[in-house]
Every structure is written in C-alpha cells, then in structure tokens.
Amino acid sequence: MLLAAAKLGGSSAAAPTQHEICYIFRKIINFFGPPLWMKYKLLNFARRLGLMLLVIWTVVSAVTLLIELVPGSPAATILGETATAEQIDNFNQKHGLDRPAFFISYTNENGLTWNGTNNRYYDYWAGLLHGDLGTSFRTDRPVLDMILDRYPATIKLALAAMLVAVGIAIPLGVLAGRHKNGVLDNIASFIALLGISLPTFVIGPFLVYVFAVKLGWFSPTGSLYPEDIVLPAITLGAALSAILTRMVRSSVIEELGEDYVRTARAKGLSERTVVYKHVLKNGLIPVVTILGLQLGVLLAGAIITEKIFSWQGLGLLLLEDGIAKRDYRLVQGCVLVISVTYILANTLTDLVYRRLDPRIRLS
Amino acid sequence: MNRLSYIGIAIAAAVVLAAIFAPFLATHDVTAQDLAIRFAPPSAEHWFGTDALGRDIYSRLIFGARISLEVGITVVVVSGTIGILIGSIAGYYGGWIDKVLSGYLFNVFLAFPGLLLAIALVAFLGAGLGKLILALCIIGWVGYARVMRGQVLKVREYDFVQAAKALGAGNMRILFTHIMPNAIQPLIVQASLGMAGAVLSEASLSFLGLGIPPPAPSWGTMIEEARQYFAATPHVLFFPGAAIALTVLAFNFIGDGLREYLDPKQRTR
C-alpha cells in the first residue's frame, strides 16, 4: 500500500525519492491526529503542570502539618494567661480550632478515628480554592487582604534589585570576559566573589552607614520617598549581581571564540559593536534563565533586607506580625504565597527558556 | 588550586584554630557585662572594643567561631550523609524508586526557597541550636543528593562496575565499595560551598532572631544587637560583619579552587 501511495505522490514512475516518502509519512501521521511534536509538547507541558500542582499540594500540607506541631494552643498564646475558659472556647470556635486537624486523628481513648470532611485541613483547602486564606488570629482581618496590602512593596523591591544587578553585572562581566585572566578580570572576579560572600545584613548596614549616616544622601530606613528604594535595592541585588557577573563573563568568553565573531571583526566592525551587538545578544540567554530563577530567590531573600530597612513588605509582615506575634494563620498564608510565587516563577522561566533556546526546544 | 584558595585555606584554618582554642585565646568572659565601659573603642584591654552591654567583642567573636563551625560542620556532615545515601539509591536503582525520589522529592525541596523553609521550620518548632541544625539539614540534603545521583548514574555504567556485577558482587557491595569512592569527588566541592552556606544561614537566622537565642555569642545575633547603635559606634558591627564575611569568603574560595582543580576543562582556561 505504501508503495502504491508513493507512486501516487511521485512525479515519475521511478522509485520514490526520500523526500516523497517523508511527505507521505507525514500525511499518514497527520491523518491520525495532531503532529507528534505537538503531542510531545502537550505531554511535557502537562507533566510540568502536574508536578507544579503536586509541589504546591505538598507545600500547603507541610505548612499545615507544621502548625499542628507547634507546642501549646494558639488560644492561650493569643489571649494570654488571664483568658477565661469561655473566651478560649469562643476563640477556638471562631477559628475552627475545636475541630479535628486532619481526616484521621488519634487519641489514647479512641485510637484512630476517621473524621470525614469535618476537619481543618479540608476547610483550609476549601477556602484556598475560593481565594480565602483564613482570618488572622490577632487582627481578625482576612489574611489575603493583609498580604495583598504588603505584597506590592516586596515585588517592587525585588524588581528594583534585579535592575541593579543587571546594571552592575553586564558591564562588569563584559569587561572581565574581554580581558580574560588580566588584571581587570581578576578585579571583577574578586568583586563578584565578595558580593556572593558578603551577607545582606552586613552590606545593608554598611550602605546605611556610608550613604545615610555619613553622606546623608538617603534616609536610613522606611519607604516614604521614591529614592528610599535605592539602598534596599542595592543590598538585595548585590549577591545576584555577583552571580550574574560570573555568568556574563563565562558567556562572553565562550561566544568570543565563535566563528561569527571573527566574521564580524573581519567585516571591520568596531570591537564595541562586536561585543555589545553580537556577542552579548547570544551570551545573554543563560542570564535570562538565571534572572527568572532568581526572582523567586529575591522574593524570599527580601525578608532580611526588609528587616534591615524597615521596608513594609511581605517579609516584615511575616516576621513582625506573623512569627513574633505567633499569628500562625498569617505565617501559613505568607509562607504559602511566597513559595507559590517562587514555584510559578521557576516553572515560567523553564518554559520561556525552552522557547528561547532552539537546542532545548527541539531535543 | 589557585592562589585565592590558599588564602581561603589560611583563613579557614585560623577560624578552626580560634574555635578549638577559644578558652585560651579569649581575654574576657563572653557573658560578663560591664555597663560602665559600654561601646568602648578598640584598645589594648579590649582589642575589638566592647558592645552595648560592655561585653568584650573579641572574646565573643572567638567563641562565636565555635557556634558557626559547630553548625557548619554538623549540617554538612549530616545533610551530606543523607544526601549521598538518597542520591546513590536514586541513581543506582533507577526505575520507580528514582522517579519518586528525584522526580518528586527532589523537586519538592528544590521548589521551596531554602531560607523561607528554614524560617518556617524554626518559627514553628522554636529557636535553639538543635532545631536550627535540624532546619538547615532539612533544606541542605537535596543539593548533595542531586549531585550524587548524577554521579552514580555515570559511574554505574563503567566497566569495572559491570565486571563486579559479573563476578557476582551484591548491590550493597557494588554501591559502597565500587561506585561511591569513584563518584564522591564533586561532593567535596559541594561540601565546601555547603559549609559557607550553613555558616551564612546560621548567621541569617540568628540575625532575624530565629537562630541561637542571646546571650550566646552567635555572629548573627551580635550583628542584630549592634544594628541599632552602629551609626554612632561602627566597630560593634564591623568586627562580627568582617568575621562572617571572611569565613564565608574563605570556604567559597576553597570550593572554587577545588572545583577548578578537579575539573581539568576549567584548569586550562
């Protein structure tokens, strides 16, 4: 049948060429459904999506389990030792703490008991799917509202830090890559290693001391004026700029050895054009990936920076209103939102990276 | 090994020696307060000056090295051992074991920002040295496991492993005496960088008030205490900051040097 088909498609009576056979095969495959590469792509996408949902489920369950492990009852912690039994009962009833924690519970008298859907874990999931993260133990405000009030500040800080990092890393990395193993390269590499090793909580106060206390250019803490973001952004972006500098350097070194660079130079282009228009364009692909992966790290790492500068973001909300005041519902919400952002950023980066680099897309 | 890694080794050795001989090197009691001399600048009596409670900063730094190294070494050894075991099992057995371990478990731990997980664990479990170490081990093992899995996947195809199999060696024997010694090299780099990471994480958590509670002389706690006063008296922040930065830098230098040394491709570059 195949031969007959080949003859039909062929232009002459001679044996079909390879091209014609391929064409016929493609026709047959298309007849049975979407092309194979599309099937593979969908499968890959579904697998990533499934893994992402599985990870999110694990994170929610782990955080819920951890809260149950906290010694002592939240009511006693929040209401204090002088609370009456009635007040404690009311509190427990309001926050569902009088009901079992999970589907199965264990007591010495009853052994293992099946609780059905009458449990807090189920309630939390039901709320979550309706966009409800519960109410704060302390303030009785919905946790989601509290988080949404503070999240924009953290995102702003993370993006500003990223801008600072890219602004430092590209010129420094190119400089180091172009003068491989020279004095400039060694200096740039040393600065990069310093950036990785210096903790945020050392860089932050140092910047405050120099630029706020001694020079008086910025205010030491707070987020009242637009320029207040400069010091926190540099503090948070320092480590990332160090990582990026090293990546840009090795990318530039690698690309400079390619044939197209020799061609560009032979055309008589200036070194500046060669590096910034040709080399950098190709060398930046891995950098884009790292940027995406680091967005999540920045959001999580912002906790320390926010504490140093009293930046009213999600990290400070977690530390001061959540952990310090033992408002576990709020801690649960903050941890969840930060980790889900992190997971989403990573998954998205992975998908974008696949589109950017044809070698990965086709493999 | 490059020149920077020798500098790293020298600094790390100094920190280790300071930690071991802390009682002999310290000039004052680390918790002894003397409010009459608070914020004293560096002098012959107090080499690095005194802090807000009049405690000797130099002696606290020396004893702080003990805490940092105790956390660093314990975390590296425990999480390294767990990671190597799990990674080897995933890489050697493959199949559904590998799918569950590297496909699900590794991804779950990698999908979670490490510092946030440590903060959440310590926030719920409570502060303290043991809980801090536990939290850092929980976030640390997966890095080793991933590297080890990749290594084992490579080494298990080598001829000598096939030969051992043909001779009838059992799985455990092949894994522990043939594969592991040949797969463990990159883990040394990981351990050195992990040491830097653990010292940094301990200081970060202590800085956030979630690590080792005062009056223990943890470097992170010292920075947190110094933060409010450093505008007027920078030395209270400078010395602990320098101690953390130098220690982390040293282990990063060593890790970088080892990586270059073990990877001939990078050595020639």
Image (cartoon, rainbow, N blue to C red):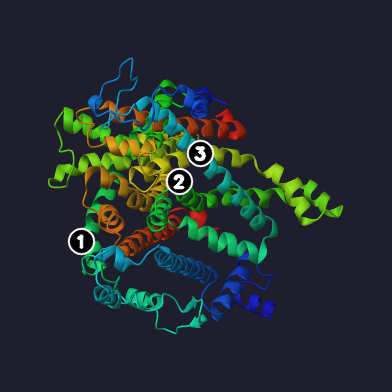
Q: Nearer the viewer, mark 1 or mark 2?
A: 2
For label 1, the crowd category at 10 Å Cα-Cα, with few meaning under 14, some 14 to 19 and many 20 or more, is some
Dot 1 falls on which chain? A
Asked whether the residues under the numbered discs 1 and 2 touch, taking CB atoms below 8 Å apart as contact, a structural biologist would say no
Image quarter of the C terminus of chain B: top right
Residue for badge 2: B129
Q: In terms of secondary structure, where does tag 3 sit?
A: helix
Query: Label 3 vs label 2: CA separation?
Result: 9 Å
Q: Position of residue A195 (x, y in %)?
A: 37, 34
Reply above or below: A230 against A150: above
Near-viewer residue (A295 or A37): A295
| Residue A268 visible in the snapshot | no
Left or right of B134 in this view: A60: left
For label 2, the crowd category at 10 Å Cα-Cα, with few meaning under 14, some 14 to 19 and many 20 or more, is some
Left or right of A290 in this view: A222: left
Q: Which callout, 3 or 2, points at the residue further toward the start of the chain?
A: 3
Q: Nearer the viewer, mark 1 or mark 3?
A: 3
Query: Label 1 vs label 2: CA separation?
Result: 35 Å
Q: Amino acid at mark 3?
A: Glu
Q: Which mark is residue A149?
A: 1
Q: Position of residue A193 (x, y in %)?
A: 42, 32
Residue for badge 3: B70
Quarter where residue A280 is shown: top left
Reply above or below: A9 against B239: below
**Quick one: which residue is furthest to the top in this view?**
B44
Q: Give me the residue at 54% from left, 51% from top.
A: B141
Q: Give me the residue at 48% from left, 23% from top.
A: B24
Image quarter of the N terminus of chain B: top right
Q: In terms of secondary structure, where does tag 1 sit?
A: helix
